[in-house]
Amino acid sequence: MKYIVVCEKVVPNVANIPPNGWKENPKTGEYTLDRSVLDNEPDPLARQAFYAALNVRDRLNKDIKIITITMGPPMAEEILRDSIAVGADEAVLLTSKNFAGADTRATAYALAQGIRKTEEVLMDGAGEYMIFAGKEAVDGDTAQVPIQIAKELGVECIAYAGGYSVNGNSLLFHRMTEYGRETVSPLKTPCLVTFISHTHARFRNFARTRWSQREKEIYVWGPDEIGAKAERIGGRGSRTQVYNIFTPPKKETANCIFPKSIESAVDLIEQAYSGKIKLSKAEEEKGELQKYTLNGRESEYRGDVWIYAEQYNGKLHPVSFELLTKARELADTLGVKTGAVLTGKNIDPLAKDLIDRRADKVYLAAHDLLDEFHPTHYTNAVVQTIDKYGPPQILLVGATPLGRELAPAVSYIKDAGLTADCTHLYIEDYKNRKGEVKKTGILVQRRTALGGNIMADIMTKDSVMQMATVRPGVIKACSPHLDWKGEVEKFSPKLLPDDTKIKVLSREHFTNTGGIEQAKIVVAGGMGLKNSNNFTNLLADLSEAVSNRFQEKVEVGASRRAIEFKLVSTTCQQDRGCQIGQSGKSIRPKLYIAIGISGAVQHTEGVKNSEIIVAINNKEEAPIFQFADIGLVGRAEEIIPQMVKCLNNGMGG
Amino acid sequence: MFNENKYREMDVLVIGGGPAGLATAIHAKERLNEVAPEASVVVVEKAEDLGRHNLSGAVFRSECLDELLPGWRDEAQSELDEFAATGGKGKLSFPAELLANKIEKEDLYVLPSEKMRIKAPVPPEMSHENDHTVSISKLVKWLGSVAKSKGVEVYPGFSVEGIASTDGAVKGVTLANRNRDRDDLFEPKELLSAKVTVFADGARGPLTEQLIKRYNLRGGKNPQMYSVGVKKVFEVSSDNPFGRNRIAHMIGYPLPMGVFGGGFIYSVSNRIHVGLVMGADAKYCDLDPQVELERLLSHDWVAGLIKGGRAIASGSRIIPEGGFYSFPDQTVNGGIIVGDAVGFVDMRKIMGLHYAVLSGISAGEAIFYSTKSGDYSKKTLKDYYLPNLETRKVMEDMRKARNYRQVFQKSFGPMLFPLHRILPKIKVSEDHHYISEKKINHKRPADATDKATLALLSGTMHPEEQDSHIRILNPDICRKCVAKYHDADAGMESVVTPCIKACPAEVYAWNSDEERIVISPGNCQHCQFCAIRCPLEVLEWSVPESGGPKHKEC
């Protein structure tokens, strides 16, 4: 490998929205995000990819040339010059108003064309390069573009690399999957790698900065220079269209419940965790049945409503049932059937489970190569299922790590629009401003963007089917209907080991791999724990009990103060990996338990996306209680042992 | 091809992209264009972007810009006229906005308590007639863009660590190491060399302080005296309840008797800036500027003005107040000091902004003549710098105010006040010598925001993995400090030391288990008030590798 191309992006800094970032509409009283007051910055994950490229160059071969590329407005040049100042050798800016309004598909195409041109002009055309990108950008957080670039270029994609190691002259990547970690080796260049890791930042060098500001030439190309077809870029090349943007309803201050006893608190946590009750803040589909009806008209798209049923080790992922529930509702509204696509090796027994959740058809694509998740084989299997039995008019995929790797590839191959991480889906007619119905019975795909600060309604256009990934946990799965009748279609897709140029060297299986930021349950301690003994022992006891109760790995975090006061382990004191808050890690677990943390804004900023927040604090007036869903007032040393007891008892009973 | 060393050499190197540094750079570049158009003028600034580390009241006397940027006023005025003619559509450029914020109403109030206010006449020496209110962050951002358009090279995001000198002459500076603590990523220090280095690093500038020490520039002078200024910016409804183009100064509440300082409220467009200035020589060891600001904000009148408004920014800084008798020598071989780093502040009005610009212009002149003669010696620089400061009346104002602040430090001060202009030099000691064990026990008002919120509103951020830029030289001494200033009967849960109280952003806390001060450098506002208030001189504040506040409005 002689070159690394890094895909960068300029994004608004949505992690630190200044207080005047929200403008009130005096008429409606609604707040909208004023993007002009946000700072622009390089996308942090793309920067991680860039730092990884620099580290690879330092460790593997000093002669590797790093070329950074971005598509964006002319001011994006500033960020490219920054990259040069940090250590990139060349920079390419794709800019033109014709690129604007692009969805992930049109963006991926333009960047792929840019990379092709870069190969020709800057990389002597021998294909000896890798492409590094961030897993997703903070403003759109779709994680679709890199995978689609790989599909457009016809190269392999190694998604979610959390690190790499140098093995002789080659690179091994450690990638996170939903169920563990894989070490993979690319057998061929070019290939594309997306990064999730947080390596140490690199800085600009003064001499390079001055050089890049004064003399360094940057390549600025428009559609003509990169040979991009007009019908494939910008709005024209897009397969989705945003037609409605609004601000999510202001998060109500949580109405913290103070249970009378620790037993009832644990009970409440369990009910909330299992979805039996919803606490105020949890994002949720309304659950009301759709009133929409086609009234004899034909819908814009034809075919059934399908879901992709994710399974692992002979067990279905719960999101599959959530998707089926939604699919049933959509199919009934459209007057069509539901279908579930299942890929794997020994998957026959799972068909029944899917039929029990009211699937009309179950498509089993079984093959030895599908034993473990492999993006290329899985993509091919799903595409072949669609070709053989479809296309459906809607295909829903869970927005799990697996789903978010699979769906973009399938959508790119099938030339279908895809909306990532939807929280709400329903059928509606699309009307223009005058109120005329332009499209009948389309799927409205609602999602949040800009770090959850805006919501958008998106529809598919110019496609054979409408695709969306759906955030797990937002739909309440229906209970099994044991008398439901469905058909099973089984076939063996045509797959060859040589279809992929990535070799999986080893797999480790464990739930939850992404550390505290990806954790589903986080238990964190603050100054209220007083000393490191308390911190270590109480948190360990509680984590273990919670972990056993919910069958989920629990990560331990700490407030900034707790780290500075050295309550935490030495490792965390050094790398601050467990620090939660504005200046540490932002987390979004399903369950967050804060112990002895008062709840200064800087801390709450980092945990506001948690679904259920439980606070234990001996001060009733602690700000954390204004923020928490469930509160327990008292000393941690007394409360935690009792909680542990309740949690363990629950196991037996 | 890229030759690294070539890019580390320049003709004029300005440390600090504030008003003084940018004025120096702009004027030097403009004048050098006459004799050496290829001469490079480079500004380095520690903030990520220009203006982000600048905070001031601020009231600005704009005439200094007429010399720096001839024609700016007419241009801004015509934009303003057009704006008015079209009924105020669109957005004003910075200079036009500056002109629009002319002070038209000025009040002085005595606040005897948290409920009362008494109007007092504004003494002529405090008058701000013809002045403008301004956001210094915006002023600096604008000056930066002007500088770039004139060919000045401006590089924000670089922290300077040390001075490079040989044979008694300054030759340049070294930049702070990056990734100090990471062996694998360690990037060596860069040495920037220049024919002349301009020290424009602001109040208690770490580089200037090094320079003063190295060349003993303050020999026989008073030590510098400081106050801290803490402020909050409120966005209020368009019918600004305080009134546009208005400023007010307040004395009395919330500060206790005998403590120098006071409050201010300035209108800047539809924003209200409320701030409090408090002397670093305050005798109460537990006096807390952030609490005092919150107390001011809870004063009936002030609270009424900001009711319904939103706090959108906050921050703190120190003000060099020693004046004329505290000035260090302002030149060395190959070096020149400008602005707040010298301490050009007129204490009668507590104004320094235009003196910063005027000193920058004067330094620009001196650099021009030195370049012409190829002689950057202390003598040549001084021979052109000082007369230029004189012709711009900087020194005249400084001499008039020379004892103004000092009289407040003496117990007999108020009696001497009418005589301050004719008294000989009043000797003072460093501020921390005046701190006593006395406590005032002022409580944060109910509902008032805390220090973490101040830090949040300033946007301050320092990468957690970098070494602390604040160091305690000897932790044992801190225990002595606690023993002296903390009242053990009050319990060890909330320990009082001058540094814990001084910091407006909760950088300091006491860990009672380990009996030590714990530092959270991430919150730092870069004001350095902690180090000034440390009675035992064990706090060392240095420039962090990166990070700091992100002021946009302050």
Image (cartoon, coloured by chain):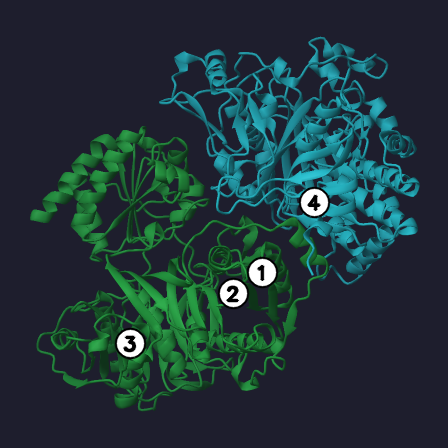
* Mark 1 vs 2: CB contact within 8 A: yes
**Mark linked to residue A211:** none
**Amino acid type for the residue under numbered disc 4:** Val
Observer-nearest residue: B206 or B297?
A: B206
Cα gap from disc 1 to disc 3, whole angstroms: 35 Å
To which residue does mark 1 refer? A88
At 57% across and 74% down in the image, what residue appears? A118
To which residue does mark 3 refer? A378
* Mark 4 vs 1: CB contact within 8 A: no
Label whose residue precedes the other's in the sequence (1 or 2):
2
Q: Are marks 1 and 3 in one subunit?
A: yes
The hue in which chain B appears in the rendered picture of the protein: cyan
Q: Which chain letter goes with mark 1?
A: A
* Mark 4 vs 3: CB contact within 8 A: no
Query: Where, by quadrant of the figure, is residue B223 drawn?
Result: top right
Cα gap from disc 4 to disc 3, whole angstroms: 53 Å
